[in-house]
Amino acid sequence: MVQRPVLSLQLFLPVTFVVLWSTGFIGAKFGLPYVEPLTFNVVRFILVVLLMTPIALLTRAPWPATPRAAMHIAVTGLLVHGGYLGGVFTAIDRGLPAGPTALVVGLQPLLTALLAGLLLGEQVTRRQWLGLGLGLGGVLLVLGSKLELDGVTLEVLLHWVWPALFALCSITLGTLYQTRFCPAFDLRSGSVIQFLPCVLVLGAVALVTETREIQWNGEFVFALLWLVLVLSIGAITLLNKMISQGSAVKVASLFYLTPPTTALIAWLLFGEVLAPLAVVGMLLSATGVWLARR
């Protein structure tokens, strides 16, 4: 009887995180026709800072005790939010479909497992390696049919893919960095510290590389608010909570479920048909995550 609330919470956090995180690709699909990728994220980050700063102050949230602790949180924000979201949105904006983009960044669990042993000293068991392998296979099955890259030159392909690869490396290093240097911090004040440097860095890059023009309409506003409230606050809060409670490999394994879940949401919202092979891939990916998280 005592164990049930704990087990329910342990199940609720990862399931809710996967669903919320997967909607980020849908939000990008809705919003990017009306704004450039870095400008989109800068506006998003500004809104998060404006929303979370008064909440942190009014609720008297604790702030980092030392500048060094604040620096660690800021670096994590630049990697997990600035680098990852900037790369993902740039890849989709350049023409890489959301499915292949999710596939590239969905390789994070394997990259995390490879680096966790070297950087954090985590022991990756054979069962976890098997789970990670099954998860990768499931992702490839789900999204393999969406890789419509035939006839594309290598130069164009690299132009599409490298921002997604940058996003993959950024969120992998960010997860490992946070696990090592700042696994636990107050989520109210921490959100401000994480997103403020993202505003400054991405804003500087957007100032040089983009026109910063925005077509304000209902669809863009909906996508923006969804990404701010549901993703940047809701999903990131769950991510930070799970990082503080588990190993880097266990948390990263959840990202294998993002591409299949994104495909399912796209089917529900846009009528994209799921092939039988994709359903098999979803089950395979879910099995892999279960093994990797044991």
Image (tube, rainbow, N blue to C red):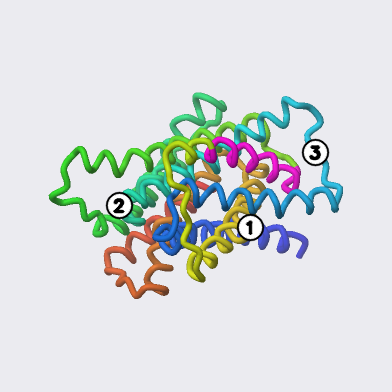
- Amino acid at circle 3: Trp
Q: What secondary structure is marked by label 3? A: loop
First in sequence, mark 2 or 1: give its number: 2
Query: The magenta stretch spans which residues?
Result: 186-203
Residue where numbered disc 1 is placed? 234
Q: Nearer the viewer, mark 2 or mark 1?
A: 2
Q: Is residue 166 visible?
A: yes
Residue where numbered disc 2 is placed? 95
Q: Is residue 127 visible?
A: no
Q: Is residue 222 above or below residue 47?
A: below
First in sequence, mark 3 or 1: give its number: 3
First in sequence, mark 3 or 2: give its number: 3
157 vs 180, left or right, is left
Residue 154 placement: quadrant: top left
Q: Is residue 195 above or below residue 225?
A: above
- Amino acid at circle 1: Gly
What numbered label is drawn on residue 63? Answer: 3
